[in-house]
Image: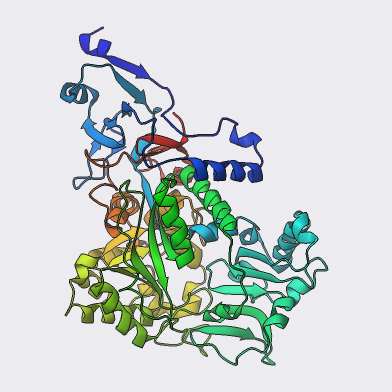
Amino acid sequence: MSSLDKKLVHSRIALPRRRLVTPLARVSPLLLALVFSALLFFGDFSNPADSTTYAICSHGSNVYIVDALNSRTPCIFVVGSFISDVGDLDSIQRRRKSTAPLEVRYIPDGAMILPGISESHAHIMHYGLYRQIPLEVGRNISETVSFVENYIVSNPDIYNNMSKVIDGWGWDHTAWPESRFPTSADLDASPVIRGRSVMLRSKDGHGTWVSGRVLQDIRPLPHAVEGGVIVRDKKRKPIGVFLDNAQDLLPIPEPTDEDYERRFSITVQSALANGLTSIHDAKLDFRQLDFFKRKAAAGKLPIRLYGMTNYDEGEEYWGNITKPQMLSDDHRFSARSVKIVGDGSMRTGGAALYEPYTDNPNTNGFMRVSEATINRVIPLFLRDGWQVNVHAIGDRANDIVLDALESAFEDVDVAAMRPRLEHAQIMAKADIQRAGKIGVIASVQPTHVIDDMWYAEERIGPKRIKGLYAFRSLLNSGARITLGSDFPVETMNPLAGFYAAITRLSLDGRSPHGPGGWFPEQRLTRLEALRGMTIDPAYASFTESILGSLEPGKRADFVVLSKNIMTIPVSEIMNTTFLATIIDGIAVHGEI
């Protein structure tokens, strides 16, 4: 044995971690959520006491640094919460300033290490709500109603209290054979539900389906709602579905702090298991913002959060009163961006278009925040130091936002403020080029592509569809792309987004255009997709100097995957598992 070998301690022991002793498979979901809530509440994650020093190595150069050169390396050297060095083991040992034995850990053959994955667009509290009732898997209206019935019956506190409001998330009428919106009559047909207040959000969050009790309680209703729709039948009677701003008419109960704690713990538990080390929450109200601020101040955030505080039509401008929340000392929390929901969704026909929908010539969709308001508040938010992130799906919405950003150039350096188009779905060719020129970040969701591709052309026609989810065109224009899922709208698993971005195929390998993918010329390369999940989200949240890559001096956030998604056949990507998720050098999920 060489003298160098004698200084090394080679092991396959688990990474230092916070984990439950009881195997997860043996714990009920409710108990697990309660225990995890206690961990989140009492644990101090800001200065982990069990930080340590170790090298972690792959067999071959299967550590992807994601630096400017897209480098690969055999090992990374972790000291406390930071990456101290990268390279082969001999080189790391030579550069060390200590003669103490070096603990070395190896990942399995065929596995890989990549920087911590950042979710660029998600809804933390909504995901916790979504997990209450499995509405998304309902194959038709009847089955979806049965899930609500089962939820009521299986919770005695709800079943025995007719005044208890039942809320849920995830139904998708475009996936049902009925090909129509559900109605309050569909809910009231159930003797278990009849007489109860039920409010169920659609999968994309742009619609709410309510029971007859709710309809009765909110009458009389206005004839029309600016930026929204009360869906009515042929006799002009409300059917029980409210779209976009019309949802503001509903008496949706205010969540309690206990609700927030439970939903947050459910979401974080799933996020860490899916390799996420950072989440951009795409629509915080002020109560949620305060909840996260308190968590951060107490050192009780087990994951990094970047918040977008919501601004709605009709609000007084608050950007000069509420100040952007800059990055906390432990780099776990910041909320320096404003979120403006410009229009509705394509799925529900609310995305703002210049020409009518192909499958419904009676509507062009609508702006949820007026053009005048967008033109007024975007320059103000930029002036007061806020990053501006605008939900823009339709071609009209994207055009309006780009106009406002261009005009703001007179007073501020827009590119330095890193404005974001959240979704950037349907864009005219000229606007794609403008996005690159202005320096806009396109925050896109590849799993939306493989979900919407089956009905999109019928909805918007053969011309506009060429500018739908045009990821390659956006990159070529000079715009930066960052990838997310919009969970709970789509699966939280970032590998699904990676797969969708590089294949534009459904998870079973199909598309309307065949096995080559839907509009395959818009596919991303694997490296582009990897950067879109790591360093580009860091740039989009002003943290690229400390996160997003495995370069020395950055935080030791990384993920260990069971397979190398950069080289395996695409058919194997979704069979890849997350062996470990590491934040600040500590394994918060899994072991090796």
282 with respect to 134 (left or right): left
Number of disc labels? 0
Determine whether 402 is above or below 565 in the image. below
328 above or below 467? above
Say which quarter of the image contains residue 160.
bottom right
From this viewpoint, which residue is outermost toward the right?
191
Using residue 287 as the reference point, say whether residue 194 is left or right of it: right
Residue sitting nearer the eye, 240 or 577: 240
Res. 517 in view: no
Quadrant location, the C terminus: top left
Residue at horizontal 56 percent and vertical 81 percent from the top: 246
Question: Is residue 15 among what the camera can see?
Answer: yes
Image-quadrant location for residue 179: bottom right
In which quadrant of the rendered image does the N terminus lie? top left
Q: Position of residue 100 (x, y in %)?
A: 25, 16
What's the residue at 78%, 67% (across, down)? 162
| 119 or 114, nearer to the observer | 119
Q: Is residue 402 above or below residue 35?
A: below
Q: Residue at x 74, y 66 (%)?
A: 142
Residue 508 x/y as whole percent: 52, 53
Tell me the colour scheme of the image.
rainbow
Q: Residue at x 47, y 58 (%)?
A: 291
The image shows residue 395 at horizontal and vertical percentages of 37, 79
Image spot of residue 342 (x, y percent): 40, 77
Q: Give the residue at the far top of this rendering.
A: 1
Quarter of the view holding residue 256: bottom right
